[in-house]
Structure formats: C-alpha cells, structure tokens
Amino acid sequence: MLKLAKWMLLLMLPILPSMSSVHAEKKMIEADGYYVMGDGPEENQAVAKDRARADAKRVASEQARVFVETISEVKNGKLTRDEIKTVSANVLEIKTENIEMKVLAGTAVQYCCHITALVDVDNVMEQIKPKDREKFQESVRRNKELEQENERLNLELASLKQKFKAASEPEREKINVEIKRNESKFTTAQWIEKASEYSNKKNYSKAIECYNEALKLDANCAQALNGLGWVYQAKHEYDRAVEHFNKALAIDGNYASSWNGLGYASNYKGEYSQAIEYCNRAIDSDPNYAAPWNNLGYAYNHSGNSSRAIDCYYKATELDSQDSAPWSNLGSVYVSLGNTAKAIESCQHALDIDPESAASLSNLGYVYNRLGEFEKGIEYCSKATKIDDNHAQAWNGLGFAYNASKKFNKAVDSCKKALKLDPNYANAWNNLGYAYGGLGQFKQSLEAYKKAVELEPNVEMYQKNLEKAKERI
C-alpha cells in the first residue's frame, strides 16, 4: 500500500496490552479429510488423494478459526468473517500428513487424509494486525475467490457423479470428459492456493513457481495471472506486475484487484493520471473495495488536487476502519496545506490503529519538522527507522531535521541512507546538498543539487539552491 507521499520539506540555501498469558503459545490441531472414488465415473487417483487432503485442511482451518477468534478478542481485533478465514488458513503450518485407502462396497474406495498442524500465537497476532493492510486485504480477496471456486467445483462434481448413475453409455463418456475438466480446474485451484500460501510467507520464488504450474493447466486463469502481478508488485518489479495485471484484465475486464494493482504500480512510477483512471476502474468494479480509494487519494494528492484526495482518503477509512494508511496519508495532505492541527490529528488516529506504523510515525515527524520542532521531528522519524530500516521517507525526514539543527554529519548519513533505498529521491538529494554545504564540502553540495534538479527540474527551490551552490565554487 502506498503509505505516504515523498514529502518535500525544502531548505533554502543561505547566501552564506499485555499478551504474556498467551504469548508464544502453540496449538496442535489434528484433522481428517475424506474422499470416495470408484463409485461412478472415471477419476484420477492422485486428484482423489488431493481432494481428501483439501478436505483435511478445510477441517483443520475450521478448528484454527476458533483459536483465531479467541486471540482476536483478546487483542481487540475487529476482523470480518472473511478475514478470520484468511488468518486461519495463513497461520496453519502442516507438520505431518498421512493418506490411507479403505475399500468400500463394490469398486469404491475411500481415501482418508490425517494431518497434524501447528498454530503459533505470534503468527496469529501478526496476521490480526498486519503491517501492510492492502496486501492482507488482497490475500483475503484471493482466499475468498478460492473458497468460491472450490465450492463451485465440488457442487459440479457431485452433480456429474449423480447424473452418471442414470446416464447412457454415450452420455457417460461425455460426463467422464467433464470429470477430467473438473479435476484439471481443481488441481489449478490447488496450485493457486499453494502459491498464495507462499506469497503470504514472502517466499516469492516458490509462489511464482506455483502460479506458473497453475497457468500450465489453464493459461487463461485470470486469478493466477493476478496473483503473479501482486507477487511481482511485492518484489518491486513493477513492469512485470503491470504485464500480468493486463493479462488478467484481458481475460476478465472487471477484475477489480488487477485494476487496483495497475493503479498502485502507476502511483509508484509517478504516472498519476493513469493511476486515477485505473483506480476508478477498480472502484467501478467493486465500490466497497477500500484499497483503490486510498490509492486514488494518493494519485489526486500528487496531481495537485488536495480536496479530492482528502475525500478519497476519508472514503477509504469508512470502508476499512482498521487500515492506518489513509489516516497517515491524510496527515501528509493536511501538512502540505499548512493545517498542522489536522495533520497531527490524522497521524495520531493512524497510530491509534497501528502504533508501529513506520509511515504514520514518519509523517508525524514531518509535521513537527514543518512546525520547526526539530527535536520531535528527529524523535518520530527515528522511531520510524527503528521499526522499518528501509523507510526512505523517514531517513529523509531525519536528514531535514538534522540539517535544521546544524548536525550536518548526521544529516549526510541520513540522506545517504534514504538515497540508497531510493536513488531517485530528489528531495533527499536536495537535503544532502544542504548538508554538504553546511560542512563546507561545496563540490559535493553542487553535485547533489544537480541531481535534485535533474530528477525534478520544475521545483523552484532546487533551482535556487543549485545557483547559489555554483556561486560558492
């Protein structure tokens, strides 16, 4: 999720709950799943075993759900039914699995899959309050799609097996073809489920492998293509993400998740007019989808339409009250408008939702920098970097505050860390130029300002700082 804008705080170059009772608790779950084959049409033995395995995982997930609901209540989590289902599926760690075959009457056999699975409270707690709400919500959407697809396939299979009993021989041949197609779709869904599990655990290479296995079975599977898009998004490979989102949309033009993915990627690349178009398409497809409203606000804010951005962010908060990002983003809009009271209020609201939100802490640091309270700016931006060492905006905020406090060596270090994370961060180059100037290193200062102007030539302050730096050489 796009947490916040790349703030431009410009320095003008001068002429000279305790969870101890349950923490670390682990719960072992045992579950059995069943599937009967040989009582009608032709079926694949391997797929039959997979159906028994899927049934066992479903039963285990149901048991885990009770545990998740209990932890959620203790932690005051406000999870929807679909969110609880997703957390339950995500936290199951299968430890053992055993499949046995039992011969029934006639030619029928029953496969019984017995699994043991572990649920770790620490993992549940992380899922209840995810660091990235948008990615979690995408996981919820994927899980719901899989649940609906599996339910559809199971109902279709039951219907086909029932029809087979009274069918003629030619009709049975057609039903067997449909059974094979159903098995292929089921196996495709299983690969997508595995991919989603790997993606949730940030094992992106395995997730990509599993999605590609699904596409070998069904090259036109929009869900697998969309899933790949979000994996590449998580890997910051935005061109590949866009490629797969577009492929998914070529199959299903109303796939809201893919439209939102395109909006997210366009925002990251600074293509805000396109982001607005894509986010609106996502909202048209699903008006109650919170993430595109937040991403739309980001695009409007960077397009200079602050009032529209504020409307979009507030809409996102209405649709998902547990997401801190829209509140944090509201803080960035209000501070740019000079409304520091509303900025602080918005950032504090974000921190009430997620006290460890690096984006919200960083934003609050920027607010205090704007107010000239640089010690508080340093305090909050430092907290953000301790939570997320890869938060470029927080490092840049530190650089600004250290410059204003004339702690130029620390400013240089902070700006360099921001630029290592984002080499195209123009404002960090500008702040680095100021820091070098404060240390009397005028050639390095000049080069940093040149880079800032090269990246954002329309920012007047960068131009003025560059001209003054030239005068010093």
Image (cartoon, rainbow, N blue to C red):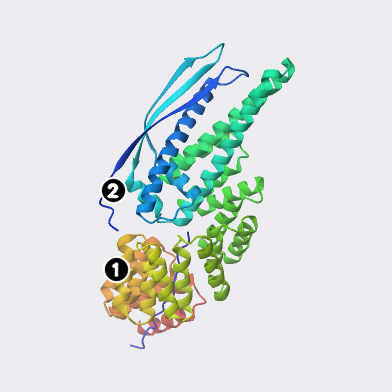
Q: Position of residue 89 (x, y in %)?
A: 44, 41
Q: Position of residue 313 (x, y in %)?
A: 52, 67
- Mark 1: amino acid: Asp
Residue, far top: 106
Question: Can residue 451 be seen in the rendering of this structure?
Answer: no
Between residues 59 and 95, which one lies in front from this camera angle? 59
Q: Residue at x 26, y 50 (%)?
A: 21
Residue 332's image quarter?
A: bottom left
Between residues 391 and 125, which one lies in front from this camera angle? 125
- Mark 2: amino acid: Val
Between residues 333 and 454, which one lies in front from this camera angle? 333
Q: Disc 1 to disc 2, how far (Cα)?
A: 41 Å
Question: Can residue 378 be seen in the rendering of this structure?
Answer: yes
Q: Earlier in the sequence, mark 1 or mark 2?
A: 2
Between residues 211 and 135, which one lies in front from this camera angle? 135
Residue, far bottom: 15
Q: Position of residue 52 (x, y in %)?
A: 49, 27
Is 152 left or right of 409, judged from the image as shown?
right
Residue 22's tag is 2
| SS at mark 2 in the image | loop
Residue 3's image quarter?
A: bottom left
Is 369 above or below relative to 197? below
Asked whether the residues under the numbered discs 1 and 2 touch, taking CB atoms below 8 Å apart as contact, a structural biologist would say no
Instruction: Classify 10 Å Cα crowding around label 2: few (below 14), some (14-19), many (20 and above).
Output: few
Residue mark closest to the camera, 1 vs 2 = 2
Q: Residue at x 40, y 52 (%)?
A: 128
Residue at mark 1:
413
Where is the C terminus found, in terms of image quarters? bottom left
Q: Residue at x 26, y 77 (%)?
A: 407
Instruction: Classify 10 Å Cα crowding around label 1: few (below 14), some (14-19), many (20 and above).
Output: some
| SS at mark 1 in the image | helix
Residue 384's image quarter?
A: bottom left
